[in-house]
Image: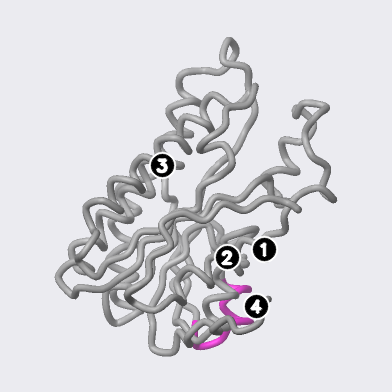
Amino acid sequence: MITTPGATLPSSLDGVTAVVTGASRGIGEAIARSLAGAGATVALVARGRPALEQLASELGIRAHVVPCDLADAAAVARAVEQIGAVLGESPRIVVNNAGSFHLARAAEESADAFAATLNLNLVAPFRMARAFLPAMLAAGRGHLVTIGSIADRHSFPLNAAYAASKFGLRAVHEVLRAETQGTGVRASLVSPAATDTDSWTATRAGAAASSPTSEQMLRAEDVARAVLFVVSQPAHVTIDELRLSRS
């Protein structure tokens, strides 16, 4: 991690348990690697079991595979139980990262596709936060990290469903931040600008000509370093919101 002169290095996450959703690739995979590298034991949550198992084999005993379709409420409930079992406790850190991104004009977007985006990008993160927040409040410690987007504050063409989900997710974060203040539980929003991942690559053909190229985007590892910085602060420090852009 890059530090400025006199800056304090992040504390170790040894003994800390964490959950990362969307951990099979992209930003989620990079976050999982970063947290495990700092000493945390991480539950890896995503649909793709083979990719999760490959990542877990690389991370070793610090990683546990929890396959889950986060768009399925029953599957999330089962995953929550499995997370508690594999970690041996309710997680100290929950990183809500999983989400979908597609481009469509509002006049052409189907209501079903719009609802599916909100279910995965907004409802599923709420389910995960809701599942673990009571235990965090009871313990007087814990950290809910929400991965936002430049689209949680700025609206772009072809982005009706994604922007709605990310604006909503930022609103949920703001409520969580207000409700947890003074409890020992922290809530942080990390919002990166366009990041070069498979999700963006899959939609690039329909993107506007003004959209950034891969070389103009952030890397998944940039976001992972930001998340590690956020969760490594002393207990009395909360980074409410951290916004990343390409310099």
Q: Amino acid at mark 4?
A: Thr
Q: Residue 27: within the magenta? A: no
Mark in the foreground, 4 or 2? 4
Mark carried by residue 203: none
Q: Separation of disc 1 and disc 3 at Cα?
A: 21 Å
- Residue beneath disc 4: 3
Q: Which quadrant does the N terminus fall into?
A: bottom right
Q: Reading the chain from its start, which is encountered first: label 4 or label 1?
A: 4
Q: Reading the chain from its start, which is encountered first: label 3 or label 2?
A: 3
- Asked whether, in this view, residue 209 is left or right of residue 225, the answer is right
Q: Residue 60: within the magenta? A: yes
Residue segment shown in magenta: 53-62
Label 3: state its secondary structure.
helix
- Residue beneath disc 1: 222
- Asked whether, in this view, residue 118 is left or right of residue 54, the answer is left
- Asked whether, in this view, residue 224 is left or right of residue 184, the answer is right
Label 1: state its secondary structure.
helix
